[in-house]
Amino acid sequence: MKTSRRFTSKNPLRPKALLGLTPLLLALSACSSNDDPAPEPPPPPAPVVNVLPAFVAGTVAQASYDGSSDDLLTAGLGKTGLLGAAPAFAVPATPTVAELRRNAIYNNYRALIDYTLVGGFTRLYGPNIDINGADTLGEGKVAGTEYIAVADDGTGRQNVVLMVQVPNSFDVKNPCIVTATSSGSRGVYGAIGTAGEWGLKHGCAVAYADKGSGNGLHDLSSDNVIQVDGTIATATVAGKKAHFNAGLSEAERIGYNAAFPNRVAYKHAHSQQNPEKDWGRDTLRAVKLAFYVLNEKYGTDIPAQPGKKEVVITPAKTIVIASSVSNGGGAALAAAEQDTESLIDGVAVTEPNAQPGANTGLTIKQGAAAAVATHSKPLIDYFSFANIYQPCAAVSAQAGLSVSAAFWPAAYTASAQNRCTALKARGLLSGATLADQADEALAKMNAYGWQAENNFLQQSHYRFATNSIVVTYVNSYGKFKPSDNVCGFSYANTNATGDVVAQSAITQAGLFSSGNGVPPTGGVNVVFNDSVGGAKLDFLATSATSGTADFALDGALCMRSLVTGKDAVSGAGLFGTQKSWSDRVIAGMNEVQLTAKLRSLPTIIVAGRSDTLIPVNHAARAYYGKNQVLEAATSKTRYYEVTNAQHFDTFIAFGALLGYDSRLLPLHVYFGRAMDQMWAHLKNGTALPASQVVHTTPRAAGVNVTLANVPVWAPTPAASDAIGFAAGVLTIPD
């Protein structure tokens, strides 16, 4: 375990045995003859040669940016460009690599934050805000060098994209590295606006990884793929440069197209690698690549070995913070758990997808309420549960259909009501009326780990996330091919009536920039092949069992069965293909569970209490609690829970369309504070404040978020805010 680099001495202590021998050695020296020849000085140690890590396939691409016409953080757009509309491609059918990079940075930056002025962008955070919170950086462009490499085993099937950005402000005498593993299933620029921005502003090298998911599409009709550089080519032309190839033989692809035309495959779902099990490894590899490129850039030449550099920047001399948000935050925690080489000095993450595995030794209590009934479930467990009950729960008056008709047409309300009716018919709800059924569905959600703070957000999360996460992760954990059509689902573009249509060549050409790696994305949607009358967009699909448009309940129940290993309606055991598929899914789930063993590594975890995507009872609270159960006596982990904050800051930017802005505040503000806190701790020894709840104050719609709305956590929390742990019980204040 590395100690802090900055506030402890780096000079090795003299061995105690030699200290005791010093008087004797001096006496012997005095008695020696002046005629004795001087001893030969020991030869200088052989230089440590900088070597390209073995996991890198091919060469490391390099490009420098002047900080004016183009840059590391904003791709030349600056704060003004990030506030505006997405830049157009000069030739939409064939965007250049530079244009694709620019738009990828634009879209990924805005995808993770509230990008509006009233929400705080360019006032409280953003490229123009300096490390002290002042608006002094102008457009906020950052000059430096960008390195991109691919980690692979030689097959071209992994092709994990790694990137290191080194700002010109990097100080070789005070080196630092920040990890920025992508959130969600985004590409390598996925954390540019969070960990990337913080690291670059602090003069640190930023180590990015797309963690083997990324925005990799394979159009099975045209056989087009997205290459690592973002451009489109056929799978044959791309070869190992394809970001993802579905791995079907030509006969399989043609046969599948004949039966299911115009389908596409995506890397996270269909790589057959279960990439999540390697997210920690990929994050550590990004750090190792950072050390390599830094020593290539700043290392000294070795005269005896022309072209070789001596290692001068080492882990022992470098502050390394593992960071990021959401899936990237989970990857940072996984990396910290797996770090056997003492590369990482501290961890600072927000809203992490942290799956702590079995956690029977923990009880969670909030305020005076009874203990939380259900916590610490695997991600696909609670998502597949929500995929059944969430759309019906959204109809409850306690939740509310708040999403604008722009995103939720009347047909969706009808389907939500049909879902309630169908659940009653299957014996999964018992309420006599629609209102009773909706309230019952919401009560089931609350009993399964969601809280009252989540109720308002249930509809929007079902609309934008739940079904897509279930389809992606079940396929990923089970390592299925796209041609398996698991539970009757596939991916394809659809038209206004929900029918499958061919990919648009122009849209496909820009998917590297506009897609996020999990359909629905870039025009690609989730399709229920088994809908009555033929394949339909899942939101318009009709289940054979109910005979109604019920958001493809038959498929949702099938998915739930694969996750639990039992029939979702009867509770009976599975058999045949369903049993073998379920075994595969459960094996994949087990591969990705974390340990919560951080070995006294300084760690900050921040989460929004209203997080409906990754509920705190299953992730942040559960992971922190397990860490305390296992390591309470030695743990340096802190947990800060923020009220009126949730997973999708960008949803706040939609204003009245979703209704988040008058209820919720940007959690991104607290990501920056977590990084600042960890930086001060590692660099100066500043104590980490005790775990606590931070109570925020919402503002009216259209009113600027100010610092008064988002107070800092206290150096010493009041008793009413302090999070406690004793005898296996994690106590969270209201």
Image: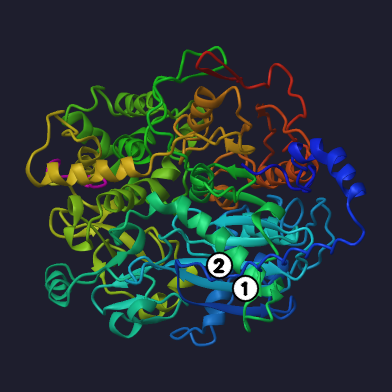
Tag on residue 373? Answer: none
Task: Identify which residue is drawn at 22% across, 32% down.
Answer: 423
Q: Residue at x 81, y 67 (%)?
A: 138
Q: Position of residue 176 (x, y in %)?
A: 70, 57
Earlier in the chain: of badge 2 and badge 1, it is 1
- Judge the density around disc 2: few (<14), some (14-19), many (≥20) Cα neighbours within 10 Å: many
Tell me: 472 left or right of 612.
left
Q: Quadrant of residue 228?
A: bottom left
Residue at 34% of width from left, 37% of height from top? 386
Name the one closer to the observer, 725 or 733.
725
For residue 670, say whether it is visible: yes
Residue 54 pos. (x, y %): 46, 67
Q: Secondary structure at mark 2?
A: strand
Which SS type dominates the magenta stretch? loop
Residue corresponding to mark 2: 163
Q: Residue at x 28, y 59 (%)?
A: 272
Q: Quadrant of the N terminus?
A: top right
Q: Is the C-beta separation of discs 2 and 1 under 8 Å? A: yes
- Amino acid found under the numbered disc labelled 2: Met
Q: Is residue 126 above or below residue 711?
A: below
Question: Which residues make up the magenta segment?
Answer: 545-552
Residue occupied by mark 1: 146
Mark 2 vs mark 1, CA separation in Å: 7 Å
Q: Secondary structure at mark 1?
A: strand
Q: Is 375 part of what is drawn in magenta?
A: no
> Does residue 408 appear anywhere in the picture?
no
User: How far from the left and from the top, in percent, is residue 407?
Assistant: 43, 53
Given residues 398 and 672, the one toward you in this image is 672
